[in-house]
Image (cartoon, rainbow, N blue to C red):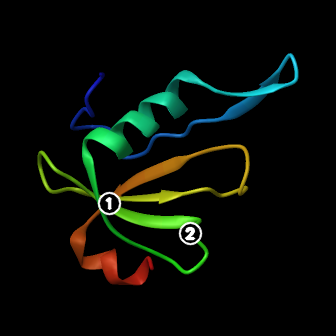
């Protein structure tokens, strides 16, 4: 798995319809691996469309959102001082 680089502060994946099937692009697949293997869930909002995760390797906080509900995953790295405003 490609690990996060120090200069990465946002990943934007997308879902596309190909031959009648919804398929995650390479970035979205990477995000899914990070969420399942590296990130630790801290919390989520009541809708489930926003969640806060912590990178288990360096303790950086990542906010995972689905801005269009369907179409893209979008984690963004943020400072701990803003964490309380996310959920």
Q: Quadrant of the C terminus?
A: bottom left
| Residue positioned 61% across, 75% down in the render | 47
Q: Left of 55 or right of it: where is 12?
A: right
Q: Quadrant of residue 77?
A: bottom left
| Left or right, 30 with reference to 61 | right
Give the foreground label among 2 and 1. 2
Q: Nearer the viewer, residue 74 or 17?
A: 17
Q: Secondary structure at mark 2?
A: loop
From the viewer's perspective, is 85 left or right of 23?
left
Residue placed under numbered mark 1 in the picture: 53
For residue 1, above or below residue 10: above
Q: Residue furthest right?
A: 20
Q: Residues within 10 Å of mark 2 (few under 14, many from 20)?
A: few
Q: Residues within 10 Å of mark 1 (few under 14, many from 20)?
A: many
The answer to whether residue 82 is above or below residue 40 is below
**Marking on residue 48:** 2
Alpha carbon separation for disc pair 2 and 1: 13 Å
Q: Residue at x 53, y 22 (%)?
A: 26
How far from the left and from the top, in percent, is residue 31?
A: 44, 38
- Residue 76: x and y in percent read 42, 53
* Vertical relation: 31 (above or below) 27: below
Q: Which residue is drawn at the image coordinates 23% and 71% (left, top)?
A: 80
Residue furthest top as drawn: 19
Q: Which of the numbered marks, if any, corresponds to residue 42?
A: none
Circle 1 — which element? strand
Q: Nearer the viewer, residue 70 or 75?
A: 70
Q: Please determine whether, in this image, residue 45 is positioned above or below residue 57.
A: below
Image quadrant in which the N terminus is located? top left
**Residue at the spot 32% in from the left edge and 60% down from the top edge:** 53
Q: Earlier in the sequence, mark 2 or mark 1?
A: 2
């Amino acid at each position: 798995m490609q690990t996060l680089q120090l200069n990465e502060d946002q990943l934007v994946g997308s879902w596309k319809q190909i031959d009648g099937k919804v398929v995650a692009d390479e970035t979205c697949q990477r995000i899914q691996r990070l969420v399942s293997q590296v990130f630790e869930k801290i919390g989520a909002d009541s809708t489930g469309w926003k969640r806060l995760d912590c990178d288990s390797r360096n303790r950086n906080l990542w906010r995972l959102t689905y801005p269009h509900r369907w179409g893209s995953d979008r984690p963004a790295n943020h400072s701990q001082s803003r964490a309380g405003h996310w959920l």
